[in-house]
Image (cartoon, grey):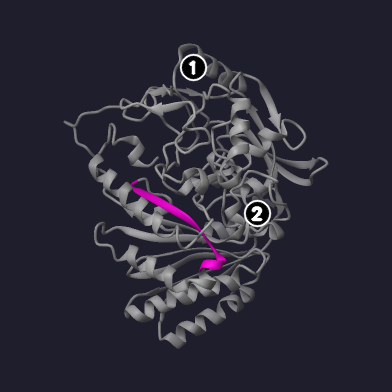
Amino acid sequence: MAPYWLNDSCSPFSGPNGSCTLGNTPVYAIDVDSAGTVAAGLKFARQKNIRLSIKNTGHDYTGKSNGQGSLELWMHHLKDISFFDYSSPDYTGPAAKAGAGTQFFESYKAAAEHGVRVLGGYCPTVGMVGGYVQSGGHGPLAASYGLAADNTLEFEVVTVDGRHIVASPSQNSDLYWALSGGGAGNYAVVLSLTTKAHPDGPTAGASLAFTNTDTAKYWAAVGAFQKHLLYLTNIPGFATSWGFDNQAFQLNVATLPGGEQSTMMTAWDPFIQELKDLNVPLVSYNTTEHRNFYDHYEHYDFPPEIYATNSSIGGRLIPSSTVQNNLTGLIDVFREIVTDSTFPLKRISAISMNVTHDRVGNTAGSNAVLPAWRDALYTLNVAIGFDADAPPEELQQVQAKVNTWQALFDPLTPGGGAYMNEATFDNPNWKVDYFGKNYDKLLEIKKKYDPNFALWQHTSVGADVYWKVADDGRLCRLD
C-alpha cells in the first residue's frame, strides 16, 4: 500500500512517542473464507450504512483497497489453485482456477509443476485475481498471450445483493466483460478466477546496462533503445522490463518464451552494435536460456520500485507512433524528469509488449481493457522515492510532482491513456485516460449490479456519481 493512503498511520518509524491513528486504514476487516462470509459482510455494511473496502495483497498506488472508517473484505486467504482441461463454445484447452488470494509466486510455481504457464506480473507478491486482472494486467508473458484480462474464462463472484454467481461469456456476460479490464472491486466481489493456461517450455532471457559518462552519447543510446523496441515488439512473444535515471540505464529482463539463447543474442545484436558505434560501453550484458518460464522468472532480479511501498508513481501508455514520429520530444521529456532536482530519488521505468488484437487473437470491444493498450509500444511509469518516515506534507508534494510529470506525456500521446493500476488517483482526465470509450458502457453495468454504489474507490467507474469523500474520510451522498 502506498504511504499516501496509509497516512503514515501507526508507523514503526515514528518512534515510541509518536501519535498513532488508523488514518485511511479500515477500522475492521473480515477474513473472507467463503461466499457466505462475503454475503454476510455486504449485508452488514448495507444495513449499518458502513463504507466497504476490498483488499487482497494491498499492492495499491491509488488507494482503492482501503478506506477511512470502512469495513474491509480481506480476500488474502483464498489460496486454492487447480489446473484442468476447460471446454466451452469460446475456448477449449488447459486452464487454471485460482482463489482471490493467489499471488504470482504461488501461481507461477504451481503452473510450472503442471507443465503450463499462466499470466502474471513481474512482482511476485501481487495477487493474480484482484486488481491486477480486473484492471487489465500486464507482465512478461503478455507479449505471448495477451493481457491477463484477455485470458479470463470465468469469474466466481458475490454480487452486492448477496448472490453467488458465475460471470462468463455465456452467463452474466455483461459483468464478465466489465470484470475483464474495467477496474477492480467495483462491480462485484471476486472469489476466484478461471483463466487460460498455456503449454510451458524453454524461455530465453537477457539483461544489460550502460551508464551516463557522456551526456550526449548517453541520451543518444537511450533514443537508440527506443527505436530498437519497434523491432523487438515485432518478434512474437518478446517482452522487456527496463528503466533509467540520469546516471544509468538498465534492461532488467527481456523475456522470449520458446526462444533460444542464440535467438535472444540475435535480437540484441543490432542494438549492441549501435552502442559500439556511439562509443557507449556496456557495463553488463548477459543472455540466458531456461527449461521453463518459472526458472527464467526466478533467475532475474527486478528494480526496487516494483516492490517498494515508499514511492509514488504516475504512468502513460506510449504508442509506437510517438517513437516513430516524435522521438526528440519524448527524449526531451525524459531528460526533464530525470534531471529535476526537486526530488533526488526518481526513476523512469517501462514494460514493453505487443498486445494488439492481431497478436492476442481477439477483437475490439471483446473485453473492457482500455483501447489504448492495443496501440501501446510500452507502459511507462515515473516514480519518486522517499524516506519511510516522510511526513504527509512531503507525500502531498511528491503526489503533485508525479501528476506534473505524468501530464508531460499527454501532448506526446494524443488519444492515449494509462494503465489504471500504475497511475495517479487525482488525474483530472481519469475517465478518458483509464477507461476511454468503454466508460459509459461500464457505468451502465455498474448501475445494474451495484445500483446503490456500495462499492466505491478513487477513479473507479461511477466514483463521482453517488458519493464524495468528506474531510474526515467518510463517504457522503451527493445531492
Q: Position of residue 222 (x, y in %)?
A: 43, 73
Q: Toward which corner of the image does residue 283 lie, by quadrant?
A: bottom left
Q: Toward which corner of the image does residue 168 lie, by quadrant?
A: top right
Q: Position of residue 317 (x, y in %)?
A: 51, 57
The amino acid at mark 1 is Ala
Q: What crowding class fits label 2: few (fewer than 14 Cα within 10 Å), some (14-19), or many (20 or more)?
A: many
The residue at the point 47 percent across, 55 percent down is 316
Q: Is residue 429 magenta?
A: no
What is the number of the mark on residue 45?
1
Question: Does 385 sit above or below residue 459?
Answer: below
Task: Work out which quarter of the rendered image holds the N terminus and state it.
Answer: top left
Q: Which residues are magenta?
A: 310-322
Question: Does 248 sit above or below residue 61?
Answer: below
Choose between 291 and 335: the one closer to the eye.
335
Label 1 SS: helix
Per the image, the residue denoted by label 2 is 146
Question: Does 335 sit above or below residue 307?
Answer: below
Q: Position of residue 126 (x, y in %)?
A: 50, 44
Label 2 SS: loop
Q: Is residue 236 left or right of residue 205?
A: right
Q: Position of residue 327 (x, y in %)?
A: 47, 72
What is the number of the mark on residue 268?
none
Q: Main secondary structure of the magenta part?
A: strand
Q: Is residue 315 magenta?
A: yes
Question: Does 414 sit above or below residue 260?
Answer: above
Choose between 251 and 15: the one closer to the eye.
251
Choose between 159 and 466: the one closer to the eye.
466
